[in-house]
Image (cartoon, rainbow, N blue to C red):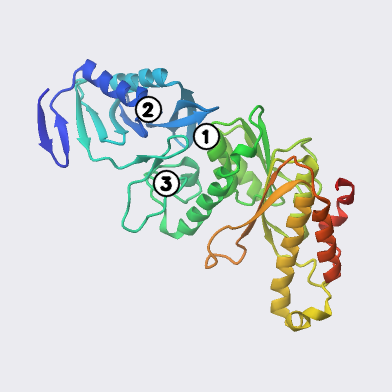
Amino acid sequence: MEQSDEGDGIMSAETTTEELSALVRGAIEAGKLIQATVSQPRSKSEETRKIAVRPVLLKGELRYQFERFAGAKALHHNMAPADAADELLRLVERDYRQALLKTPENDIQILVSKKGKAAVLRGAPTAKAAAAGGAAEPAPSHNRTKSYVLPEGEPVPFLEALGVMTSEGRVIKAKYDKYRQINRFLEMVADVVSHLPADKELTIVDFGCGKSYLTFALYHLLAIRTGLRVRIIGLDLKADVIADCAKLAERLGWDRLRFAVGDIADYADADRVDMVVTLHACDTATDAALLKAVGWQASVILSVPCCQHELMGQIEQPLLKPLLRHGILKERFSALVTDAVRAQLLEASGYKVQMLEFIDLEHTPKNLLIRAVRTGSPVSAQTWQDYEKFRDFLSISPYMEKGMEFKAKV
């Protein structure tokens, strides 16, 4: 096979059908394919303009996910390696003029002429395999060194629809903080996915979802990237916002993601929920969501509290007078006390609790995330006793305690 230098890669003058088959099958069946993109359909009537292929782990087995982009919709199909090789080869040989395969050794570009002749350009690798699921990381950049769950340069339809990313995968400068927030949230979710039930469809509720950047991100991570069976409900009081979110979910073809208008405390449309998300629910609305989660025995809880006013007017402790006499210090202290109470009561309900920084302080002061996973282990009586001493020392009567009979659990 003749070869000639072209740029930084090596171009084959002509690639036979057998050579093309060996190239595609070799990358997939050897488990070396990190990412592939097929584009430029040969037929003008073809609605699917681009197809992305990436490896995913489903129940511990390697599969290749084909993501087809048609307008604003993204359709997904998971295949075993041998079937994926057949499908990718068919797309290249019959339906599309261009393909890019990324492996640890090379970027391989396949170009098909109008006469159906294929040529191959090999270049230096720009992606490396990630540890879980085989997802690709972006090539290093002089000013972007962090590896994100949703890497820049890889188009994501819901981020494009929400105005965070262009169709080429470039993050819009004014939305970069939101992009970082979404990725940070997904990192926190990815760390606890193993605590969710593996033998059923998962039900997830996002209380106070707002414009639902993170709700869409959650569906993308769990249903699209990870291949889990999920049903996600976004709940908010603003009817116009909910209507917009529902339209976007329909455009994307995400039929297991729905939105509803409603109040956290009154929500009763599910008998059992596996994950509860509550981001910036104001004051005791956060407590109401946590109580719902505990009542459902949710496996995972993710909560970013907001506006913790309840205990500020209750705290009374003479020994803390130098602290409490200053309004701004009392407000901050009260917020910390409120979240400490929530954490201790969650532990008294059988959860392991972590307090995590959500995003950097310069972007928002509301940067604390409570992450709790249900352990199923017996709760120590000491957990409740420590809470009582803390509560009584500050002379407080928290909303969350009044909502449940914790003493009966220890």
Q: Which residue position is annotated with label 3? A: 151
Point out the tag, 1 or 2, that comes first from the N-terminus.
2
Q: Is residue 66 above or below residue 323?
A: above
Q: Quadrant of residue 253?
A: top right
Q: Is 36 positioned to the left or the right of 182 in the image? A: left
Asked whether the residues under the numbered discs 3 and 2 touch, taking CB atoms below 8 Å apart as contact, a structural biologist would say no
Residue 372 circle label? none
Dot 3 falls on a residue whose secondary structure is loop
Q: Which residue position is annotated with label 2? A: 31
Near mark 1 (Cα within 10 A), the count class, few <14, some 14-19 or many ≥20, is many
Q: Is residue 325 above or below residue 288?
A: below
Give percent across and percent down for residue 333. Answer: 71, 72
- Distance of mark 3 from mark 2, alpha carbons? 21 Å
**Nearer to me, 238 or 84:** 84
Dot 2 falls on a residue whose secondary structure is loop
Give percent across and percent down for residue 212. Answer: 60, 48
Of the residues tagged 1 and 2, which is closer to the observer?
A: 2
Q: Residue furthest top?
A: 18
Give percent across and percent down for residue 35. Answer: 37, 34
Give percent across and percent down for residue 355. Answer: 64, 57
Q: Which residue position is annotated with label 1? A: 224
Q: Give the amino acid at mark 2.
A: Gly
